[in-house]
Amino acid sequence: MSLNRKFPILILDFDGVILESVDVKTEAFRQLFSFSPDNVDKVVSFHVENGGMSRFDKIRYIYDNILCKSLHHDKYEYLCNRFSELVLNGVLTSNYVNGGKEFLEFFSKCTSLFLVSATPISELMHILTQRGLLDYFEGIYGAPRPKTECIEEILCLSECSEKDSIFVGDALNDYNAAKMAGVRFIGRVKPGGINIFKDKGDVETVVPDLEELKKYLEGLYC
C-alpha cells in the first residue's frame, strides 16, 4: 500500500466517474427490452433512476415489477450475456470524464486508488486491461459484490479510517453505499445534468469532472 499518504484514499466508481459511459448502458437497456415496446420507457427510466445497481438486480426487478413476468434461468443468462455484448465496445471507446486520465496518473502516485463498480468483475477487468488502466488501482471490485461490502473490505485491508477515505460516485446507490460504510462521499454530476445530491446534506461536495475534483482535493490538502 502507499506509504505516507498526503491525500485520503480514493475509492472511485467507474461509469460516469472515470468514463463517460453511462449513456452506453442506457441505450443497451433500451435495446435489450425492445421486445416489450409498451414497457421500454419504464425500463429505461428505472435504469436511469437506479445508477449504481448491478445489471443482474435490474433485470430481475424489471421482470418482477415492470414486465410482471416470470424470468427463467436460461432467459436471465441470455439477457445478461446480451447486455455485455451491447455495452462492451461502447465502453471501450467511451471518452474519459474530463481530467480523468490525468487524475489517475497524479493520485496513483501519492495515495491509494480503488475501483468499486456495479459492472461484473470479469467484464470490468477486461475493460481495464484493454484501456491500460489496471496499474492505477490497488484494488478492483465489481458485481456481484455489494458496494458497501467492497468499501468495508478496502477500509480493513488499507487500515484506513472512514474519515480518511472518500468514495466518488455519480448515483444515489453510490451515496448510500458510502453512507452505510461510513466513508466520506463526493458526487459527480455531469455538466448540464440534474444534481441528484442537492438534498443530501452529508455529501461533501459535488464536482462536474475529475479536473475539478483534483483542484478540490489539492485545495484541502496542499
Image: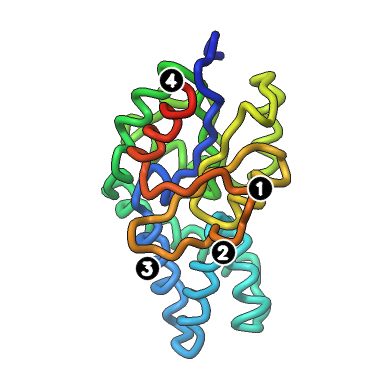
Please tell me whether residue 191 is drawn above or below residue 143 in the rendered image: below
Residue 128: which quarter of the image? top left
- The secondary structure type at the circle numbered 4 is loop
Mark 3 packing: few (<14 Cα in 10 Å), some, or many (20+)? few
In the picture, measured across the screen, residue 211 lies left or right of residue 206, that is left
Q: Which residue is mark 2?
A: 50
Q: Give the Cα separation between the discs numbered 1 and 3.
A: 25 Å
Is label 1 in contact with label 3 (beta carbons under 8 Å)? no
Q: Is residue 98 left or right of residue 153?
A: left
Mark 3 vs mark 2, CA separation in Å: 15 Å
Circle 4 packing at 10 Å, graded few (<14), some (14-19), many (20+), is: few
Residue tagged 3: 27
What residue is shown with label 1?
A: 177
| Residue occupying the far top of the picture | 3
> Which comes before the other along the chain, label 4 or label 3?
3
Badge nearest the viewer, 1 or 4: 4
Residue 8 on image: x %, y %:
55, 25
Q: Secondary structure at mark 2?
A: loop
At x 40% / y 66%, what residue is drawn? 28
Q: Earlier in the sequence, mark 4 or mark 2?
A: 2
Quickly name the residue at label 4.
222
Three-letter code, disc 4? Cys
Above or below, 202 against 109 in this view is below
Kindly report the distance in space between the C-alpha atoms of the residues bearing marks 1 and 4: 28 Å
- Rendered-image quadrant of the N terminus: top right
Considering the image in quadrants, where does the C terminus appear? top left
